[in-house]
Image (spheres, rainbow, N blue to C red):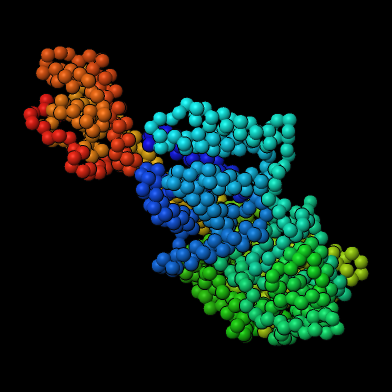
């Protein structure tokens, strides 16, 4: 195989992979193009062994999985408790599963800033695609299927990018593809035919012009792609999707310009329409998981299907009502309920399950339209129902709704001093960003111990000291809730609800986040219109003898209540004598002297928090350093070996050139004895490599014996001989030997390939 054509072929594939990675990265916000470029480079190297040596293609089958594992390790480091290969694979499987869920229910461009699993999923998709394409194009030398694979990935990026159409990426893709195809036929030939190169070039240019016209830079203008994958939704263009086992992406969901009507609810009283509960707190996110409760068995009565819900203990206090939900344009895996479901009625049979958090799950997700009725108890609690209830919580409630990824506070049996608590919190990765929680809780709660008054104080503090915005600033935290509490004090309902539930758990009060919708707008008496912009998150806290009570710390929102003395909200806080929880606003973040962010601690001390790097940043730099070393080492070695060619007298340069010729022979496995003469070397070059040295050996030896002086023609002819010999050595020795020779790694060849044993002394030129 011609080395120059093979190099150009690899460059063509690398350019094709780079364009694909950049275009695919457009689906993410913020851009992850640098990560995907590194991913494509690693995948190209892992899939290319067969190009170096044809029979080495099985090596790619080992390198590709290894590269995928290293890629995952570089982005998401393993937790300390994960030991052994099965635990590693299980951890990354969970990360990819979380990324898949985020991808399925996010909108474009995908928000990857706080979702490591989604970022990992996208990079792994690029790695697998580019790696398989590299295996086909480089190791097996089948460029056409490889180009088709990369085109599918690039097409995905082109048709999901909402920015203005950029024709240059598409044109570059077409040109690189034509470049590869024009070279592919000549890889196994000694010479490339001019007609092949001309045909390939003309085809690539014509394809680029066609792409230019289709994209819209000529008179045939297209404002949108032919197939926009964002519209490939069988639910309809104005249908919302909801999955309530994790937080929704509220900044993308609450779009005033896309305020789709989700449902109409017929109910005699307003309520928050409860969908699901998130009780698993990791420090950075609240999650729900799959339903783990009791399956509801249907009973047929009067042509409808009835599902009796299990009784809730203690029995909820409130008003018994019948609600009818008419879902118009939504897919959901939970049935909405105003309060606590007692019975569900549907004209169609449904596969329902009551979760342990008293939510009604439906499998598979139903939509885009669905009608059902619910007999439910809508909570109607007053402060007197909740105050003075004590802390005698059921064991299952404590187990499911008090867990934290860092130590609890003194009221829940945690350390009684701030220093001891900080030391314990800093021992866990999830607790380091929460170092200010102990002092902040003292400012909010003070010496209060009654759970109801604690809940009111936290609710009122968040309402009074934090601002609502769908575009909160970024302070570099991994946890959006810690960032919201200690740095920015700006967020939306997710931040308010998640932060309040975490603080309540810190005080030993069972708490969880609830997701669903607010009541919406009353269209007419008893009919409530609920839109996407009514999606909301709030909090439930547990009180002995009463059960779960609702709180809403988000400013401008209040739990609907028919009572003259509501149990939550500003009126309840005012009645309890709370004015913002007794806490003053937290100090603003101050920059450290070294430029890192210092998060202001509510205690008045400055708590240093290192700005979070991109996950796996150091490991990525390590990969980049290794790739750079792989390029720099052979280049630097060649410069060092050739330094004698550019300095000293002509005789010195002649000796250096002869020494470099013998060094090239040794690098490719052609050993020679110390007594080898130039004449014998010339016979070897002619017999084994087909290289005719002419009278050059005689001229060089005449210089050494002092019978003639070195001329410029001698140096030029010797340099030309070295280049010719290197080219023939690469063709004869194979790609693997040639690649190893660049790094100074010698392969032992068979005895007959060695230089002939000398019979007389060689001139001193090679000493």
* Residue 279 spot, x, y in % from top left: 62, 72
Q: Is residue 550 left or right of residue 29?
A: right
**Residue 637 occupies which quadrant of the picture?**
top left
**Residue 53 occupies which quadrant of the picture?**
top left
* Residue 20 spot, x, y in % from top left: 56, 43
Near-viewer residue (731 or 461):
731
Tell me how many marks there are.
0
**Residue 603 occupies which quadrant of the picture?**
bottom right
Q: Is residue 336 left or right of residue 154?
A: right
Near-viewer residue (641 or 553):
641
Kindly identify the residue that appears in the image at 44 percent across and 56 percent down: 65
Task: Answer whether residue 17 is visible to the viewer in this image.
Answer: no
Kindly identify the residue that appears in the image at 48 percent across and 44 percent down: 142
Task: Answer whether residue 232 is visible to the viewer in this image.
Answer: yes
Relative vertical location of residue 624 with respect to residue 533 in this rendering, above or below: above
Q: Which quadrant of the rendered structure holds the N terminus?
A: top left
Relative vertical location of residue 423 with respect to residue 69 in this rendering, above or below: below
Near-viewer residue (641 or 29):
641
Near-viewer residue (98 or 154):
154
Kindly identify the residue that appears in the image at 22 percent across and 43 percent down: 749
Relative vertical location of residue 163 with respect to residue 302 in this rendering, above or below: above
* Residue 166 spot, x, y in % from top left: 64, 37
In this view, which residue lies farthest toward the right? 525
* Residue 100 spot, x, y in % from top left: 59, 60
Kindly identify the residue that appears in the image at 50 percent across and 70 percent down: 421
Q: Is residue 182 left or right of residue 552?
A: left
Q: Which quadrant of the rendered structure holds the C terminus?
A: top left
């Amino acid at each position: 195989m011609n080395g120059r054509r093979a190099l150009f072929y690899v460059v063509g594939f690398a350019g094709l992979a780079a364009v694909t990675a950049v275009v695919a990265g457009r689906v993410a916000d913020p851009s992850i193009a640098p990560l995907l470029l590194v991913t494509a480079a690693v995948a190209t190297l892992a899939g290319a062994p067969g190009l170096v040596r044809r029979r080495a293609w099985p090596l790619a089958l080992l390198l590709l999985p290894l590269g995928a594992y290293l890629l995952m390790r570089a982005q998401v480091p393993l937790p300390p408790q994960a030991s052994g290969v099965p635990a590693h694979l299980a951890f990354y499987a969970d990360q990819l599963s979380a990324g898949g869920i985020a991808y399925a229910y996010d909108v474009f461009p995908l928000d990857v800033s706080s979702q490591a699993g989604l970022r990992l999923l996208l990079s792994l998709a690029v790695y697998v695609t580019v790696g398989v394409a590299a295996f086909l194009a480089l190791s097996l030398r089948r460029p056409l299927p490889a180009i088709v694979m990369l085109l599918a990935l690039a097409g995905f990026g082109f048709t999901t990018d909402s920015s203005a159409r950029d024709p240059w990426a598409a044109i570059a893709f077409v040109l690189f593809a034509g470049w590869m195809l024009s070279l592919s036929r000549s890889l196994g030939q000694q010479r490339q035919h001019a007609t092949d190169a001309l045909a390939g070039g003309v085809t690539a240019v014509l394809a680029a012009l066609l792409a230019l016209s289709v994209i819209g830079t000529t008179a045939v203008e297209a404002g949108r792609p032919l197939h926009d994958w964002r519209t490939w939704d069988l639910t309809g263009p104005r249908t919302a999707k909801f999955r309530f086992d994790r937080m929704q992406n509220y900044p993308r969901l609450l779009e005033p310009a896309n305020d789709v009507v989700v449902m109409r609810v017929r109910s005699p009283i307003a309520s928050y329409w409860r969908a699901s509960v998130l009780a698993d707190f990791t420090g950075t996110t609240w999650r729900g998981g799959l339903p783990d409760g009791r399956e509801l068995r249907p009973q047929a009565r009067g042509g409808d299907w009835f599902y009796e819900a299990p009784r809730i203990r203690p029995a909820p206090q409130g008003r018994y009502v019948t609600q009818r939900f008419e879902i118009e344009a939504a897919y959901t895996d939970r049935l909405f309920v105003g309060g606590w479901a007692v019975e569900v009625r549907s004209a169609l049979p449904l596969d329902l399950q009551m979760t342990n958090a008293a939510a009604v799950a439906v499998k598979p997700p139903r939509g885009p339209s669905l009608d059902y009725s619910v007999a439910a108890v809508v909570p109607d609690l007053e402060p007197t129902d909740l105050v003075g209830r004590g802390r005698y919580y059921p064991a299952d409630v404590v187990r499911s709704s008090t867990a934290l990824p860092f130590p609890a506070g003194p009221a829940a049996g945690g350390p009684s001093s701030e220093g001891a608590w900080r030391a314990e919190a800093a021992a866990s990765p999830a607790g380091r960003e929460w170092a200010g929680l102990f002092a902040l809780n003292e400012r909010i709660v003070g010496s209060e111990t009654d759970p109801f008054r604690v809940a009111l104080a936290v609710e009122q503090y968040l309402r009074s000291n934090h601002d609502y915005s769908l575009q909160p600033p970024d302070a570099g935290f991994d946890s959006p809730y810690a960032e919201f509490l200690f740095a920015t004090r700006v967020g939306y309902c997710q931040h308010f609800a998640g932060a309040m539930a975490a603080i309540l758990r810190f005080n030993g009060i069972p708490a969880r986040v609830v997701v669903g919708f607010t009541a919406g707008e009353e269209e007419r008496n008893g009919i409530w219109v609920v839109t996407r912009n009514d999606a909301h998150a709030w909090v439930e806290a547990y009180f002995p003898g009463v059960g779960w009570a609702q709180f809403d710390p988000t400013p401008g929102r209040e739990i609907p209540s028919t009572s003259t003395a509501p149990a939550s909200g500003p009126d309840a806080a005012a009645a309890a004598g709370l004015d913002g929880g007794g806490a003053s606003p937290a100090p603003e973040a101050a920059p450290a002297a070294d430029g890192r962010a210092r998060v202001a601690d509510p205690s008045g001390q400055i708590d240093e928090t290192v700005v979070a790097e991109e996950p796996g940043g150091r490991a990525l730099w390590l990969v980049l350093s290794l790739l750079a070393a792989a390029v720099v080492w052979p280049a630097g070695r060649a410069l060092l070996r050739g330094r004698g060619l550019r300095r000293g007298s002509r005789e010195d340069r002649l000796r250096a050139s002869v020494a470099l010729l013998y060094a090239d022979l040794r690098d490719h496995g052609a050993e020679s004895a110390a007594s080898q003469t130039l004449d014998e070397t010339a016979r070897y070059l002619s017999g084994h490599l087909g290289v005719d040295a002419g009278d050059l050996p005689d001229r060089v030896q005449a210089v050494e014996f002092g019978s003639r002086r070195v001329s410029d023609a001698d140096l030029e002819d010797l340099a030309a001989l070295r280049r010719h010999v290197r080219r023939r050595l690469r063709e004869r020795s194979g790609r693997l030997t040639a690649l190893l020779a660049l790094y100074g790694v010698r392969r032992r060849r068979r005895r007959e390939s060695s230089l002939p044993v000398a019979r007389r002394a060689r001139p001193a030129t090679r000493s």
